[in-house]
Amino acid sequence: MTSRLVALKDIPSISALYRSGELRPSSSATGLPPAKQSYNDKICTYQGDITVLQVDAIVNAANKGLKGGGGVDGAIHRAAGPGLLQECKTLGGCQTGSAKITDAYNLPSRKVIHAVGPIFDNLEESEPLLRGCYNNSLSLAVENNLRSIAFPAISTGVYGYPSNDAARAAVEEVRDFLTQPDGDKIDKIIFCNFLNKDVSAYAKHIPYVFPPLDTTEWDSTHNDLQSRISFPPTEQDLAQAGESSTHTIDHPADDSPTKVQNECTKIYLRFRLTNPAN
């Protein structure tokens, strides 16, 4: 592998992101679940290539035949080498919403968990299947003594699952898992996103499911230009990595005041970046 590997210790938890100002707490004071420091220390986010993460397991957004494909599925198979496909052929496929585990071969992780996300139709039918991908993957990790696991944005590529709905379901299902006894058997859960649309969706929904223990932990003085401006992947990046394919919590609507405020902030920061003397 030619890409620089990323060690688990170098992937920030959301506790660290709250402290640095790179993750903003929810503006809502109601409807949030109880804050738990132990959860916020477990949950991490990373934007980039999932195949370079040195974790116990990475999750592959697989198809039902487990035959490899485009997007993150193809990227994982290319990085792992032909041995991965050969083992997948022995598994007899995998049903939508379920997951199966293999060795990782040339990848820096110990195992690959192959989860088959739904082709999006509607939330009523698709969401339980998507949630199953996360729950079953975490259960497999526990069964195999894997303490750290990285998820891509399952089904948000060619399967057409809206990124906002997918992120909400993912973070809610992960929190539900952490409340169970097996939740103590996982040390780190990384939401690894490649495209900005998925990064933004998780940044919006994580604070509603994993709020900071105390809003004073978020220091607005750290909310600098670097933490507020992101740049999309180049066409070359997209060609190499591809587009990655229970209680109710009130989440922000797309036209909420929070979104409007964030958009205004972005415009202001772009102005300051191009007019530093003002």
Image (cartoon, helix red, strand yellow):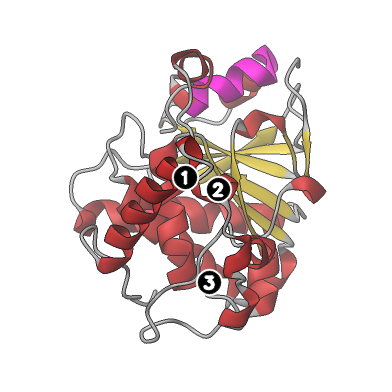
Q: Are marks 1 and 2 in contact (CB under 8 Å)?
A: yes
Residue name at image x 43 percent, y 38 percent: 196
SS of the residue at dot 3? loop
- Is residue 98 found left or right of 262 in the rendered image? right
Is residue 256 positioned above or below 278 on the image? Answer: below
In magenta, the rendered stretch is 72-83
Residue on which disc 1 sits: 272
Say which of 228 and 39 sits in front.
228
Q: CA distance from mark 3 to mark 2?
A: 24 Å
SS of the residue at dot 2? helix
Residue on which disc 3 sits: 210
Amino acid type shown at disc 1 = Arg
Is residue 82 positioned above or below 136 on the image? Answer: above
Q: Which percent across, then down, holds residue 156?
A: 36, 39
Could you say which quadrant of the image residue 222 lies in? bottom right
Residue name at image x 45 percent, y 47 percent: 269
Amino acid type shown at disc 2 = Leu
Q: CA distance from mark 1 to mark 2?
A: 9 Å
Could you say which quadrant of the image residue 90 lies in? top right
Residue on which disc 2 sits: 225
- Is residue 120 found left or right of 99 in the rendered image? left
Q: Which percent across, then down, holds residue 263?
A: 32, 52
